[in-house]
Image: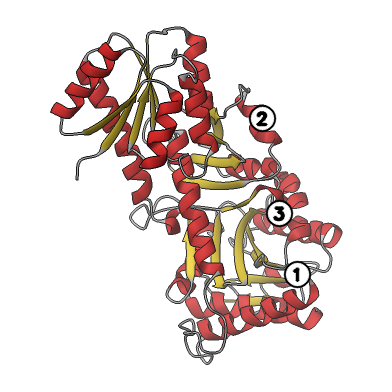
Amino acid sequence: MASKILVVDDEPRWLRVVSLYLESQHYQVATALNGEEALRKIAEGAPDVVIADISMPGMDGYELCSRLRSNAQTRTIPFIFFTARDQDQDRIRASKIGSDDYLTKPCPLQRIAQSVETVMDRIEQARAIPLEHIGLSGRLEDVDLLDLMQTLELNQQTGARLMSHGERTGTLYFRGGVIVQADIRSPKREEPLFVLLGWKTGRFMFLPDSLPEHLPITASVANLLFHDLRALEEHERAAPTDATAAPVSSPSTESPVGEMLARLEAVGRRLSALHPSGHQPQVLRLLVAGVAQSGASEVLQSFVKDLAATRWAALGTEEPWTAYRTEIGRIRISPQFVLHLIVVRAEKRFWPVWEQCLPTAHGILLLLIPATKDALGHCQAFLKARETLAPGVPVQALAEKEAGGPAKHLTGLSNSDITFGSPDEEAVRLAAVNRLLQQWLESH
């Protein structure tokens, strides 16, 4: 079926020229002479793309674009300005209120078709992104945005952090942990970076490896992704939980994975009893701490893969990109309970990160790898920080060597707080987490 394009212009000559050309390119075309007429036609049937002039009697193009971005039913429709205005302030204003492209009259008709194909291709790329490949996502009111930005910087991550706040959307692009671009799409004229940092309510998500030159996050793309993410979360919240509902597939409790899931579910029930959260899922935060060469990122990925066979799990990377290491994993244990695994560097210079992460953590898996004097010195400093910042948070260390190794001489760890073996072995790493969860249950 041909894609439908709505062309809005108060000049009949331009309407006819553009319409005839697009129809020759096998598009279905509708026209309107001003913003009010365009809104009426969109209400009758949403087009795939809107092309509009700016200067029109009554409702101009700016107002039309703002109205569409303010409406949940129309905010994902790609919007292209086609205007005689060629001033930088007009281009900036058009971008800020949510346009996907800006063309000036006159221009080759092929350029109009190219713009339509580009914005529609972006939408298709966004629809093709599996939600399980989206990195950390959640509510802005539940996180410290500066803390998340610092984590991206410290771990030199590349990608796009999308945010929504009411009718506004914005994107921070990171390359190697450094902000390289800040964009905001809003009916208001605002300065991007400081406005985005000031948003305290709304939604956010991180798209690893997304950069402006690969997939520019225009307003329609951002709104589509947030719409799909909300739909997934609403579907999960609406999933039946009564005794007649189909149970979530689970391995036997006699297996290491089954034992871990059973303990996680027990922790979830205890958290719900201690801190009722209404309709919001309970979140269990476990830190995976280690120095640069400890393999903490690999351990995180292994944990997520251990559970991904039976639970919805999200890592911020696709399977073929093995060189990329995400620093946060999210596993939905049940509709009411979510596990967050967060990698934290154990070197002393990361104290500001410890201050943010330790007080909100429920448990710590500390990797005593490699067992060098320098690495263990950093781990000792981390343990002392834990005693100061979060003395009630249980810790389970994972070391490769037993029999009087240097790990046993660390202050703050008893013999029962150390699991010996390689984290590459599933049984070893699951045993460490099972012990950690049991420690939490015994103290709560």
- Image quadrant in which you'd find residue 293: bottom right
Q: Position of residue 396 (x, y in %)?
A: 69, 72
- Which numbered disc flags the more N-terminal residue, 2 or 1? 2
Q: Which residue is mark 2?
A: 195
| 382 in relation to 112, above or below | below
Q: Position of residue 245 (x, y in %)?
A: 50, 85
| 363 in relation to 434, above or below | above
- Which numbered disc flags the more N-terminal residue, 1 or 3? 3
Coloring scheme of the render? Answer: secondary structure
Determine crowd level at label 3: few under 14, some 14-19, many 20+ residues with C-alpha closer than 10 A. some
Local secondary structure at mark 1:
helix
Give the CA separation, mark 1 to mark 3. 14 Å
Local secondary structure at mark 3:
helix
- In this view, the residue in front, 6 or 397, is 6
Pair 1/3: label in front: 3
Amino acid on which the number 3 mark rests in the picture = His
- Image quadrant in which you'd find residue 281: bottom right
| In the image, farthest residue toward the left | 24
Amino acid on which the number 2 mark rests in the picture = Val
* Quadrant that contains the N terminus: top left
Q: Residue at x 40, y 51 (%)?
A: 323
Give the CA separation, mark 2 to mark 1. 49 Å
Q: Position of residue 215 (x, y in %)?
A: 38, 36
Residue 409 — which label? 1
- Is 442 on the left-hand or right-hand side of 296? right
- Is 240 on the left-hand or right-hand side of 322? right
Q: Which residue is mark 3?
A: 378
Amino acid on which the number 1 mark rests in the picture = His
